[in-house]
Image (cartoon, rainbow, N blue to C red):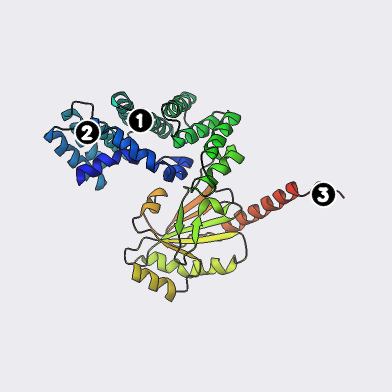
Amino acid sequence: MLLKAAIVSLAVVFLYPASGAGALRAQQTAGATTAASASEASYPSNPKAIAALQQAWRLEQQHQSGTAIGAYKKANKLAGGACVVCLSGLYRAQMAQGDYKGAVRSAAAMEAVGESPLVKSVAAYDQGRALMAQGGDQPRPEQLEQARAAYREAVELDPQNVSALFNEGEVLVRMGRTDQGRKDFQLCLSTLHPGDPAWLRVKHFADDPELAVQKMAPAFEVTALNGTTFNLDAMRGKVVLIDFWATWCGPCKKDLPYLKKIAREFAGQPLVMISVSLDSDEAAWREFVQKNEMTWLQYRDVDHKLAGEFGVTAIPHYFTIDSDGVLTSESIGSGSHLEDRLRKLIARAERASQERAAATAPAAARTP
């Protein structure tokens, strides 16, 4: 089973894109599975390579990325240096460890040994991701150009690689080539349907490409405890407060009266609150929410996947997101002073709503 999981792990490069392209992961599942199948000829047959690959996969699952790097390198060497799944795992471990230069090299090696255009497209896409991660918040012009070229190559190798197309649009905007970036976003949008999870995020970028230079909150869609669907990108025009917590967390319970006060104080205003529990015991979570009258949206992050998206390692952990989906602040620990931030964001959201209404009003209605 471990080897099977390692083989399928090639798909993960499509399922965990960076930045705004995270919204596209649901659209990539089918293509990623095809990528895994297309590269089967590159799986190791050497028993020692298989054992090393299994060990590397276990280490990665245990979040021991530093040790996993060495294990994946060993597996690839034993496989003759042409093991796509070994290189894919090595890339992931290096990205998790922050070894972005190494990740660029691993992705380039995967492209070199990949046997299908689809696998090569995944590898080129990954090179772009690693180059952008290497550049941090302020990548150099040459890093932007290298990343753009990698994303463009990924699209040319596989026109269905929508994540690469989206990321290329982001890079183009950051390079000051806004009109070209908008075209990429519009092309992405044309491949999606309004019901797709990614559609709203891509629509926002197509309408306002400058969002590409902002720190956008990860796009996600979940079903809340009350059965309603919460899609972050559907909150356009509203401020969002996300609270990561758990019933067993003392500081979280200490902050509960404060959160209830915020819910009361901002009722009827363009604010949506959602508490994301890290509880493993569903019954205890449901009982706690009901007993403490937590009337706003509640969601249990069973596999901590959403917490991982937001980089949550300690709770309580709060995030405020403005009416454009931009992540404006995060704070850890009880006693976080959120009210002033929320008032400012809500006031800005209301002004923006009024301006949009005025701009779209019929000309006759605007005539004095």
Residue matched to label 1: 123
Q: Amino acid at mark 1?
A: Ala
Q: Would you say 78 lies left or right of 268 here? A: left
SS at badge 2: loop
Q: Would you say 345 lies left or right of 363 here? A: left
Q: Is residue 313 visible?
A: no
Image point 57% across, 44% down: which residue? 204
Sequence-first disc among 2 and 1: 2
> Of 146 and 49, which appears nearest the observer?
49
Give the mark count: 3
CA gap between label 3 and label 2 equals 67 Å
Q: Is residue 205 visible?
A: yes
On the image, the x and y values in percent for residue 138 come to 48, 33
Residue matched to label 2: 43
Q: Amino acid at mark 3?
A: Arg
SS at badge 3: helix
Q: Amino acid at mark 2?
A: Tyr
Q: Nearer the viewer, mark 2 or mark 1?
A: 2
On the image, the x and y values in percent for residue 300 come to 39, 62
Task: Using the rendered view, name the quadrant where residue 134 is placed.
Answer: top left
Task: Using the rendered view, name the quadrant where residue 121 is placed.
Answer: top left
SS at badge 1: helix
Q: Would you say 354 lies left or right of 51 here? A: right
CA gap between label 3 and label 1 equals 53 Å
> Which label number is shown at residue 366?
3
Sequence-first disc among 3 and 1: 1
Image point 42% across, 68% down: which residue? 254
